[in-house]
Image: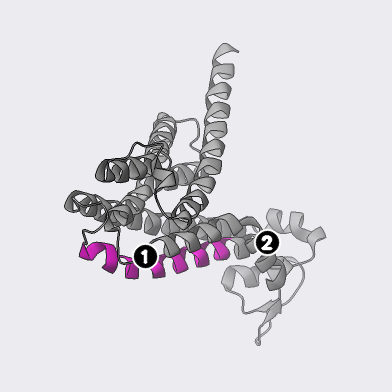
Amino acid sequence: MCVHLSEPAAHICQCFGGRRAQRPPYHFPPPRKKLKSLALCCPQYWMERAFFHFSSLSHFRLVSSVQAVLATGSGIIIIRSCSDVIRDRHWLAREYVWFLIPYMVYDSYAMYLCEWYRTRDLGHSTTIRNFLSQNRLMITHHAVILFRLRGNLGDFFVGCIFTAELSTPFVSLGRILIQLKQQHTLLYKVNGILTLATFFCCRILLFLFMYWSYGEHQGLSLLEVPFNIPFYCNVANAFLIAPQLYWFSLLCKKAVRLFDGAQAKKDS
């Protein structure tokens, strides 16, 4: 890939015996066999790349966390304002969607950008294939949420879906602490517990709460609700909760590894 290089990158070319031409671009990256020499002779370049990568990820996490706080606050307001879970309307349930749609586009682009940064030497076609392969669950999740939020009834349930974002700031903080190599700290462990608790309550128990709320309004038991609502509602909820269960299992496995590792160190 032919690019115009910055001053640190131009210095790299000199490390490999090249000369600083007056008319860029240079062809970069260098052959793989020279990567070791590159790291030894130009460590400042790799520090610059690492700092840029960390800063970009931190910005993405910050934006996600801000959106999560706004969505959760909006969801709580909607839930408290809708006494009739079916027919009551709230303007936030309609208007916030217009903020949520561009955010989801941004979030998808951020995931692609991270994948491009990791595999940019392999070409755009490979990056796109890897992105679609590794993030197909998240992309499907975004699409189902947008489909689920459309409609003229049930703003109460739209508010419930918004509150599912409560766990996002804790997930983002955990990723940043991992980036900073702070897995051994008390903050990381406390944040992990809060991540598990908020994820379980707001992304799994949330669906039981929605079914229970509908049953209370209609005079049905929790077990009767799935048989008294439209079939597509059950299908949409199944598509939403399935990835949540999968992600929660990953979080639990990670938590077990973390605390088992800490216990093993203490015993040794």
Image-based side of 56 in relation to 222, left or right: right
> For numbered disc 2, what is the local secondary structure?
helix
Tag 2: amino acid: Asn
Give percent across and percent down for residue 64.
Answer: 40, 56
Instruction: Count the marks.
Output: 2
1 and 2 marks in contact (CB < 8 Å): no
Q: Is residue 145 visible?
A: yes
Q: Which marked residue is nearer to the observer: mark 1 or mark 2?
A: 1
Q: Is residue 154 above or below residue 97?
A: above
Tag 1: amino acid: Leu
**Of label 1 and label 2, which has the lower sequence position?**
1
Q: Which residue is denoted by mark 2 in the rendering?
A: 130
The crowding category of the residue bearing disc 1, from other C-alpha atoms within 10 Å (few below 14, some 14 to 19, many at least 20), is some
Is the magenta region chiefly helix, strand or loop? helix
Q: Which mark is residue 154?
A: none
Image-based side of 73 in relation to 61, left or right: left
Give percent across and percent down for residue 108.
Answer: 51, 64
Q: Residue furthest bottom?
A: 23
Image-based side of 245 in relation to 19, left or right: left
Q: Which residue is denoted by mark 1 in the rendering?
A: 100
* The residue stretch that appears in magenta: 90-114
Write the residue at 63% across / 69% down.
9
Instruction: Locate the C terminus by quadrant.
Output: top right
Instruction: Locate the N terminus by quadrant.
Output: bottom right
Write the residue at 40% across / 68% down.
101
> For numbered disc 1, what is the local secondary structure?
helix
